[in-house]
Amino acid sequence: MGSYRMCVCFTRKFKVTEATPPPDIKDAFNRYAEGGPHMTAEQLHRFLVDVQGQGLATKGAAEGIVQQLLHKRHHMAKFRRHALTLDDFHHYLFSADLNPPIGDQVHHDMTAPLSDYFIYTGHNSYLTGNQLSSDCSDVPIIKALQRGVRVVELDIWPNSTKDDVHVLHGRTLTTPVELIKCLKSIKEHAFSASPYPVVITLEDHLTPDLQAKVAQMVTQTFGKMLFCPDSECFKELPTPEKLKYRIIISTKPPKEYLEAEGNKRKMNNSHNVKESDDDVWGKESAELTVDQEDDKTDSDASENNQDNEETDASEPEVRLSRAPAYKHLIALHAGKPKGGLKEALKVEPDKVRRLSLSEQALEKATMSHGTDVVRFTQKNILRIYPKGTRFNSSNYKPLIGWMHGAQMVAFNMQGYGSYLWLMHGMFRSNGGCGYVKKPDFLMNVNPNGSVFNPKADLPVKKTLKVKVYMGDGWHLDFKQTHFDLYSPPDFYTRVGIAGVPADEIMKKTKKKEDDWTPVWDEEFAFPLRVPELALLRVEVHEYDMSEKDDFAGQTCLPVSELKPGIRAVPLFNRKGEKFNSVRLLMRFEFI
């Protein structure tokens, strides 16, 4: 008897149920519609004032929302209705466009010196991928500027024939891109997302001839956009308002002894001497030196030897630098005085400068000199950069820098991961313009001369209550089989706080089984000691019994910007790009 092979193929249709309004929304509708089937514009206005905390909302604005919703949802309707049904009301609250969790306008005071702001800062902005072998290109620079990044870093080196300037990550296999191409792209895209100034930090490995060439390129490319200071050094930095639509150059000024130092370095390199240790601080090295391994490929660690602030008295006099034009372009001087960290963090009465520290150097500095770091950042600019072993373009925890007042916490914008989500979250503040005014307590000196100490035991200032109602949109943005081949997904939400150590916490909802539109209806309370630096973290995952849970979206929102009331919270993918439809319905309340 012959054998038969049988193949049974079946497909499962996943039914997506329309999300019904959760109990709180039904209650709010009934209360404000006064038990009727429709909510008028006047009733909606009362809801906006009472529940959504929109005291400034006008009746005209409520009228506009009603008109917009009816047109959007019922434009085919033959009748003319001027009020909302429960479903219309739910649709409004669950619309990320009409009812977002934070505003999109610049609302901070922009007339303080630049040192009073956290500034959206990129690291090795020209790399397309990892730190060792990816291509250098102007594309990641354009992407960063379009996202609102305000500080772009370029490492500049001579090309192989020494007659032009390339941008590349030195001593790695990264393929170069021409400096002029990067400059032109910066000019074209600098202000596409924000009118506030763009700072270009140059890590300079050039001869005086090529520095002169760079000065010419920069001047010709940017013209009047370029901000050139009147005097050599600022006593106080100008304001973002004053610097709108301007480009600022920041690097270490070239030394008169550049050429001699260059010759010295050539001799050193021929004996295979290690590159300069940008993180070794004189006599205090035991306290601050980073691991030698970390230092080798660090971009900033290779900032030139020539820039050590000391000059060798035995060197013969050489002619002055041939790049005075280059020196004149540098508006924000970087550099490090000789001596230890204590010396580097000295605040000079009539001079403002920029200091760079690696993430480990910062961590060590904050352990021994935390309040000195805060005091330094009240007037000067502190830039933090990732350690050199982050070959895969990963990032570090940005909050250590922010809570000590560091303005430029430099990140690999082409990487991804939860630290980058925090960076995106912080700079959603202030309309996404790339400048966030530092909290007053970081700028104030108390009568007794002390400054903010993030390690101090602080009292709870306010409590944020967060209710996670429900989620929707996955069935539109993902394939039906993305999370599970045979059944609808089992979603749960993680919600918590990133901030000063005492405020950090993550909690999670129960999982909702087999549901594309999960309803959790769970509430969490977060007591906050420093709400000004707190970020609300939200992640959705899909529970997977046998493997690692699947990622289903995330966002990070500055607590200081959260609008109270019931809000639609759009979610983003791992890289920080917004999903088309995925969003959560949440409620925020401060007590």
Image (cartoon, helix red, strand yellow):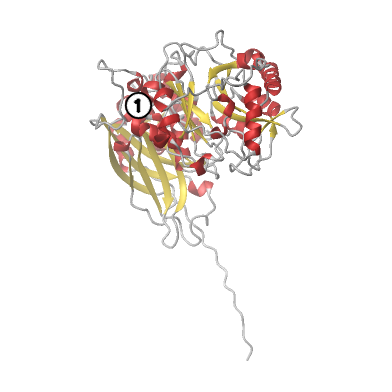
Hey, which residue is sitting farthest bottom in the picture? 1
Disc 1 is placed on an element classified as helix
Where residue 225 sits, quadrant-wise, is top right
Location of residue 465 in the rendering, given as x and y in whole percent from the top left corner: 29, 36
Residue at image location 59% in from the left, 74% down from the top = 7
In the picture, the quarter occupied by the C terminus is top left
Q: Is residue 182 left or right of residue 552?
A: right
Hey, which residue is sitting farthest top in the picture? 230
Location of residue 322 in the rendering, given as x and y in whole percent from the top left corner: 68, 16
Q: Is residue 194 visible?
A: yes
Taking depth in this image into account, of 227 and 205 the one nearest to the observer is 205
Judge whether 231 appears above or below 155 on screen: above
Q: Is residue 155 left or right of residue 220?
A: left
Q: Is residue 31 left or right of residue 579?
A: left
Location of residue 44 in the rendering, given as x and y in whole percent from the top left corner: 36, 27
Judge whether 17 appears above or below 469 on screen: below
Taking depth in this image into account, of 170 and 424 the one nearest to the observer is 170
Taking depth in this image into account, of 434 and 45 the one nearest to the observer is 434
Judge whether 136 appears above or below 115 on screen: below
Residue at image location 50% in from the left, 30% down from the top = 71
In the picture, the quarter occupied by the N terminus is bottom right
Q: Count up the numbered dots.
A: 1
Dot 1 alpha-carbon crowd within 10 angstroms: few under 14, some 14 to 19, many 20 or more: many
**Tag 1 residue:** 48
